[in-house]
Image (cartoon, helix red, strand yellow):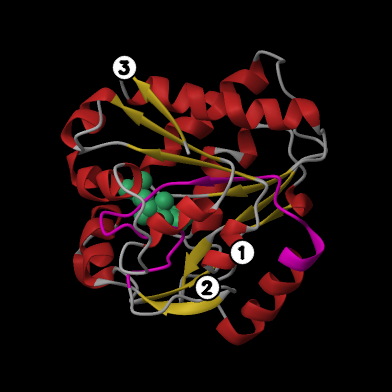
Amino acid sequence: MKVIITQEYHETCIKAAEIILQTISEKQNAVLGLATGGTAIGVYEVLAREYRSGKVDFSEVSTINLDEYIGIDPTNPQSYRCYMDNLFFNKVNIKKENTYVPSGNCPEKEIEKFTEILLKKKLDLQLLGVGVNGHIGFNEPNEKLHADVHIVKLDEATIESNARFFKSKEEVPKTAITMGVGDILKAKEIVLVATGAKKANVISKLLLDDEVTTQIPCTLLKLHPNVTVVIDKALANMAGIR
Ligand code: F6R
């Protein structure tokens, strides 16, 4: 696993964006797996800036998002579709029809659609954040994990952590649709970005030993041959990484 330690969060976003831009420069019609959440926002800002300065063309790029809350309509401002449109897609020349963000409606139908899309389009690169409990996508710590797209009950830690994006904790949906860990591990390349003290424990479990456990889903990334973890030095220090 490659680890890049940056001076601060903004540099983390630049480094992650550089890896994404490299993928697109090698393959104009790259398929990108994308994440939402707070950490990814800065990566999208850098990508949009690079687009404005003419350094990248997204016209042939396709994207597939990791997950969505069940019960949140794509038109709801809290939806990951709105997040992606507002923070990234509307700021670059990507074709909307080439972007897929799972819908939080009709879960059973959406599982089928999501699965079909992942069969048709192979991920060249997957951008990941990581939850305070080590989740990737919404693959929450458990005795067993799912390889494929599925509906998941969100962990209490995730609900608490994501309450900051809602008016109250009670408003955070309790279930989500997510790519499975198998889908994520099928990506040719994976870039994980993380920042903040709350991620120190899971980052140290990811980087400081060779244990793989479904109780800390990000540790499964140790099984993938091409993962880059980008973290700032404050997080690296807290995680005990020198
Ligand atoms: C979001 C996602 C999640 C987030 C993770 C980190 O699509 O799949 O795994 O990446 O919860 O979120 P932040 O960056 O808000 O801490």
**Magenta highlight on residue 5:** no
Other residues around mark 2 within 10 Å, as few (<14) / some (14–19) / many (≥20)? many
**Magenta highlight on residue 121:** yes
Task: Judge whether 94 appears above or below 140 on screen.
Answer: above
Which quadrant of the rendered structure holds the C terminus? top left
Residue receiving disc 3: 7
Q: Which contiguous range is marked in magenta?
A: 118-141
From mark 2 to mark 1, how far is it between C-alphas? 19 Å
Q: Which amino acid type is shown beneath numbered disc 3?
A: Gln
Q: Is residue 195 visible?
A: yes
Q: Residue at x 38, y 62 (%)?
A: 217
In the image as oriented, which residue stretches furthest toward the top? 53
> Tag 1 or tag 2, which sits nearer the N-term?
2
Q: Please provide percent x and percent y for residue 53.
A: 66, 13
Q: Residue at x 38, y 60 (%)?
A: 212
Q: Please provide percent x and percent y for residue 151.
A: 49, 79
Horizontal side, residue 76 vs residue 196: left or right: right
Q: Please provide percent x and percent y for residue 205.
A: 28, 50
From mark 3 to mark 2, how far is it between C-alphas? 37 Å
Q: Which amino acid type is shown beneath numbered disc 2?
A: Gly
User: Which is nearer the eye, 86 or 139?
Assistant: 139
In the image as oriented, which residue stretches furthest toward the front? 210
Other residues around mark 3 within 10 Å, as few (<14) / some (14–19) / many (≥20)? few
Residue receiving disc 2: 104
Quarter-of-image position of residue 135:
bottom left
From mark 1 to mark 3, how far is it between C-alphas? 32 Å
Q: Residue at x 34, y 57 (%)?
A: 211
Q: Please provide percent x and percent y for residue 213.
A: 35, 65
Pointer 3 with pointer 2, Cβ within 8 A: no
Residue receiving disc 1: 183
Pointer 1 with pointer 3, Cβ within 8 A: no
Q: Which amino acid type is shown beneath numbered disc 1?
A: Asp
